Image: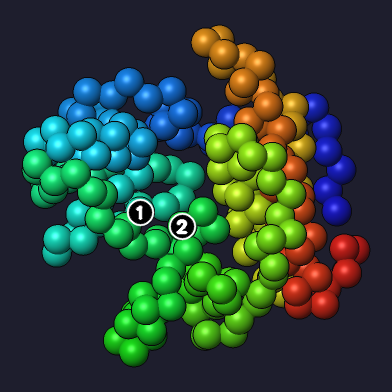
Amino acid sequence: MKKLTKASLSELAKSKEIISFREQKSYVGGGTGEAGDPYTQEEFEDIVNTGNWTGGWVLGLEEKYGELSYTGGTGITSGYIGSYNGKTQVPEIQGCGNLNHPYTEKQFNRMYESGTWNGGFVEGVGYVMDDCTSYSYNPNTLRLTGVEQWDFMYKVGFEKGFKAGITETNVDDTEIILQSVLSSTCAGDSRSQAEYEYTMIHLSRGLREGLLRGREAIGKGFFD
């Protein structure tokens, strides 16, 4: 395994974005609903629940064929939501296949039958590879804190680590270890440095624990 140095961490910091600006924005809120300043999902739900939704851009959601779905990933994107004007109940939101928002069994079956399944997390199953090989874990054993933004980032890290761990080679594993180290040493949001540091700590923890759980799922020892 490559030995880490201050130089290698510096190089990785320049080439790897650990947490995007949009993801940090999703914790702050205060959007206007414009394309460049979208609402958070919580703001969208609050406005719909009061019957005052008139359309706007929402971070992490998109609307297709009249259905809402999560966009997923750490590079969160936003989509324009034009429906639900005057309604007071948020509709069911389709999963996007990540750990925070897994696909439903119905979604999986639909994609599998149409030949469009490319892998992802499925409710009650675990991670299902593109060849439909399933690797499971008990979501109730995840070490969550109860703090929404910390647990969200822990799950983002766990997902990335788990997916790397269930691959046969160690290339992805090494990158996850580097990202974990870098995440735990990062600091820098001048608006709320302490909160940012805690967020990165939980991301780092998720990366490590997901990697170990993934390697265990395929019977691969830590130093294999």
Q: Are marks 1 and 2 in contact (CB under 8 Å)?
A: yes
Placement of the C terminus among the 4 image quadrants: bottom right
Farthest bottom residue in view: 113
Q: Picture coordinates of residue 136 (x, y %)?
A: 66, 74
For the residue marked with disc 1, what is the amino acid?
Answer: Tyr
Name the residue at 32% across, 82% down: 110
Farthest top residue in view: 190
* Quadrant of the image occupied by residue 210: bottom right
161 versus 53 height, above or below = below
- Judging by the rendered image, the residue that carries numbered circle 1 is 70
Q: Is residue 112 left or right of residue 20?
A: left
Q: Picture coordinates of residue 7 (x, y %)?
A: 76, 28
**Which mark sits nearer the N-terminus, 1 or 2?**
1
Q: Picture coordinates of residue 65 (x, y %)?
A: 14, 64
Name the residue at 74% across, 59% down: 141
Secondary structure at numbered mark 2: loop
102 versus 209 height, above or below = below
Mark linked to residue 101: 2
Q: Picture coordinates of residue 150 (x, y %)?
A: 62, 36
Circle 2: is it few (<14), some (14-19), or many (20+) Cα within 10 Å? some
153 versus 122 height, above or below = above
Near-viewer residue (104 or 59): 104
Inspect this view and state whether residue 10 appears: no
